[in-house]
Image (tube, grey):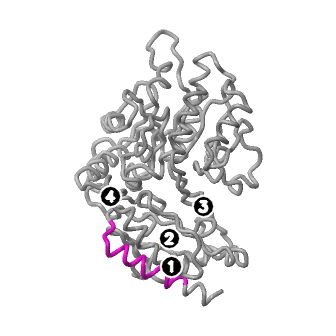
Amino acid sequence: MASGRSENPLWHPFADMGAVDGDRFVLSRGAGSYVWDEDGRKYFDATASLWYANFGHGREEIAETVAAQLRKLDAYGIFGYYANEPAMELAERIAALVPMEGSKVFFGSGGGDAIDSAVKVARAHFVQLGKPEKVHVIGRTQGYHGTHGYGTAVGGIPANGIGIGPLDSDVSHVPYDSAEALEAEIERLGADRVAAFFCEPVIGAGGVLLPPDGYLEAVAEICRRHGVLFVADCVITAFGRLGTWFGIDRWPISPDLITIAKGITGGTIPLGALIVAPQVAEPFFTGSPGAPVLRHGPTYAGHPVACAAALTTLDIYQRDGLIARGRELEQPLADALAVVAKHPLAGEVRAGLGFIAGLDLAPDLLASDPGAPARWQRACREEGVLVRPLGKGIALSPPLIAAQSELDLLADALPRSLDRLAQST
């Protein structure tokens, strides 16, 4: 087992550092759907790291693109009238793919940036329409929208807001699976106060929760009818994870804003974007004297190296036919996990919509041992599979390049990992 390099000053996100120190799991390299630790042991990356290594690891095309761009123009901001070719080309290519023709693209450093941008743009839009009172934002229980200020508030995982002081008070939450609850909340608040509703097509970090049939179409229509902006958080679901470019475009929905990140570069370089439908962006693009300016943007917005990497990433998705893979692999993944569901320690299995799944442990085990999901993650690692512990169990989101042999590996390794868990319980 890897040494863990005790007493290293690295502070890990979402980690009990007292437990982590001296017990780090140090990875040294990756290729395809696999990574290796510093002791040379090989693991199937069954979560594509943090949901983003959609085309696997070690793509030489990305390395070559990054090196070439670093030699040409390594960095320069795009504030004001400055621009660079990779950022402009990437904005054009993304805008051409979304269901909202004529959209604008606002770049940032990742998904958290994109969410904060979405909240600000939504509120600023209504200010420009003479409706400054429309500031309230509605999120969903179990929703996850990153850990920036607005994202923490809009997200529906209460633990993420503990111990950090007050969050945005103009935010409320509704049950993740009830369109009726959303309409009731809008009516309770008054539509003249509500700016936006944030919605993941499939809830990711909150437990891999699939939308009920008709839910997404219903909430999009409710937002349209009440004059509330529909924000599709596609940071996890975009770039093939659900078998389409953005995830939300699997349904006949045209959002007002879309947030993306992660798969936009396959995770190789941090990059995110907010896609803004033309009717929302219009007040900021009039070109008239004294037109409003959105006084917002991260330092690395439109970074030329990140955008160059994203352009090559889009090329890879198109050339290798990877976008459709999320839909092609959804049933084979569900079939593989049906074997796991038969284990006595297994609980609910959520799969069948995209190349993503959530697996819960049995309720009795969770009741007696709330820390069992973390121990299950360890047991999976011993079987050569890396997974993410989430709430009641684990999440899976393998690279889109995964073959049937990797799904067979999951069908074999996951039940064995539950056997290991049973032995330690």
Front tag of 3 and 2: 2
| Left or right of residue 363, residue 86 in this image | left
Task: From the image, tell me which residue sits under label 1.
Answer: 380
Quadrant assignment, res 308: top left
Name the mark on residue 387: 2
Q: Amino acid at mark 3?
A: Pro
Mark before the other along the chain sequence, 4 or 2: 4
Name the mark on residue 13: 3
Q: Nearer the viewer, residue 174 or 285?
A: 174
Mark before the other along the chain sequence, 4 or 1: 4
Helix, strand or loop status at disc 2: loop
Rounded to the nearest angstrom, the CA distance separating label 3 from label 4 is: 31 Å
Residue that sits furthest to the left in the current view = 319
Contact? badges 4 and 1 (CB < 8 Å): no
Quadrant assignment, res 410: bottom left
Q: Amino acid at mark 2?
A: Val
Contact? badges 2 and 1 (CB < 8 Å): yes
Name the mark on residue 325: 4
Q: Which residues are magenta?
A: 402-418
The residue that appears at 51% across and 49% down in the rendered structure is: 213
